[in-house]
Amino acid sequence: MVLLFDMPGGTEWILIILAVLVLFGGKKIPEFMRGLGRGIREFNDAKTNVKNEIEEGMKESHTASNAAPAAAAPNVAPTNSVPSPEKAHS
């Protein structure tokens, strides 16, 4: 497989940094980096929360499936407590 893009070398990094400085200016870059850091932190927190919720759900499911056979009622045929319409008219 042919790679279309390779990691930038030293000269490319210098050009990228200069382009960012020209586009955003020296004062906007710290704000941009703070916002980027907050976004990454929020993403990681959300990822961790979802992972924890899935693990808790799996534990609850496992616990419920182990407790279900002990709490199950014996096999009893259901009784029909509602009279059928044919018997109600006779």
Image: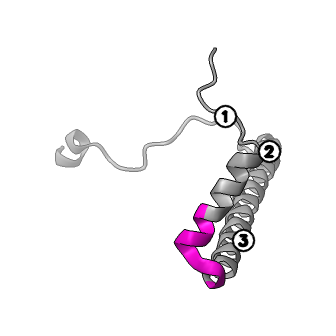
Label 1 packing within 10 angstroms: few (<14), some (14-19), many (20+)? few
Q: Between disc 2 and disc 1, whose residue precedes? A: 2
Q: Which residue does the numbered mark 1 point to in the structure image?
A: 75
Q: Amino acid at mark 1?
A: Asn
Residue 13 spot, x, y in % from top left: 72, 52
Residue 17 spot, x, y in % from top left: 67, 62
Question: What residue range appears in magenta?
Answer: 19-27
Residue 18 spot, x, y in % from top left: 64, 63
Q: CA distance from mark 2 to mark 1?
A: 23 Å
Question: Can you name the residue that lies furthest to the bottom here?
Answer: 27
Q: CA distance from mark 3 to mark 1?
A: 59 Å
The reply to whether dot 3 and dot 2 touch (C-beta < 8 Å) is no
What's the mark number on residue 87? none
Which residue shows up at 23% across the image and 48% down it? 88
Task: Pick whichever, 52 or 56, lies toward us.
Answer: 52
Classify mark 2: helix, strand or loop: helix
Image quadrant in which you'd find residue 3 = top right
Classify mark 1: helix, strand or loop: loop
Please, is residue 84 above or below residue 36 in the view? above
Circle 2 or circle 1, nearest the eye: 2
- How many marks on residues? 3
Q: Which residue does the numbered mark 3 point to in the structure image?
A: 37
Circle 3 or circle 2, nearest the eye: 3
In the picture, the quarter occupied by the C terminus is: top left
The reply to whether dot 3 and dot 1 touch (C-beta < 8 Å) is no
What's the mark number on residue 62? 2
Label 3 packing within 10 angstroms: few (<14), some (14-19), many (20+)? few
Q: Amino acid at mark 2?
A: His
Task: Pick whichever, 82 or 12, lies toward us.
Answer: 12
Q: Amino acid at mark 3?
A: Gly
Q: How is the model colour-coded?
A: one colour
Q: CA distance from mark 3 to mark 2?
A: 37 Å
